[in-house]
Image (tube, helix red, strand yellow):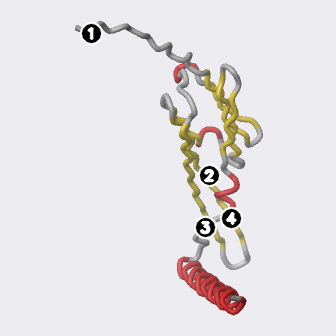
Amino acid sequence: MPGLIIWKDQEINRMKKDMERLLSKLRNDFGMPLFSRTDKSAHFIQLSETQDYLIAEAQVPDIDPENLEISITDELLTIKGEVKREHVRQEKNYNSIERRRDTFSRTIKLPCRVKIEDVEATYQEGVLNISMPKCKPEIARGVKVKIK
């Protein structure tokens, strides 16, 4: 049995190396990383709940609030944003301008319905706070049905 485990580990390590080689080649051919770690870690949403409100807190650093778009339905919250960067480098013989535009979009399913007309959002120091008042739960009506 130990021989099987060693063989399995060797095969997994060989597959990891093959995948790393493939991703490295793709990354070099396209000139940019396939999976940007900053995009994945920089824009996350934390959802918390009180008795009357759902509160979403999104980390969106380096984004102008003008470039944020929040849309909400009864049960879905979507946050979209765009970051525009420009880097100017001036040398003796040439000038270089590099422009970069990154977009992101996050959609989360809300655990309950919210009053979409009363949703409020604030943005301060790279943190977007969205306060969503919950809808009151509908009371189920019961009707006794007569059997004929």
Seen at 27% across and 9% down, the residue is 147
Q: Nearer the viewer, residue 134 or 106?
A: 134
Q: Amino acid at mark 3?
A: Phe
Q: Residue 109: x percent and y percent?
A: 54, 39
Query: Label 2 vs label 4: CA separation?
Result: 17 Å
**Could you say which disc has been placed on residue 147 in the image?**
1
Q: Residue 84: x percent and y percent?
A: 61, 54
Q: Nearer the viewer, residue 116 or 52?
A: 52
Q: Earlier in the sequence, mark 1 or mark 3?
A: 3
Q: Check disc 2: other Cα within 10 Å, few if <14, some if 14-19, many if 20+.
A: some
Whether label 2 touches label 4, CB < 8 Å: no
Q: Amino acid at mark 1?
A: Ile
Query: Label 1 vs label 3: CA separation?
Result: 63 Å
Between label 1 and label 3, give the one nearer the viewer: 1
Report which residue position mark 3 lands on: 35
Seen at 72% across and 48% down, the residue is 61
Q: Is residue 115 left or right of residue 97?
A: left
Q: Amino acid at mark 4?
A: Val
Query: Label 3 vs label 2: CA separation?
Result: 17 Å
Report which residue position mark 2 lands on: 83
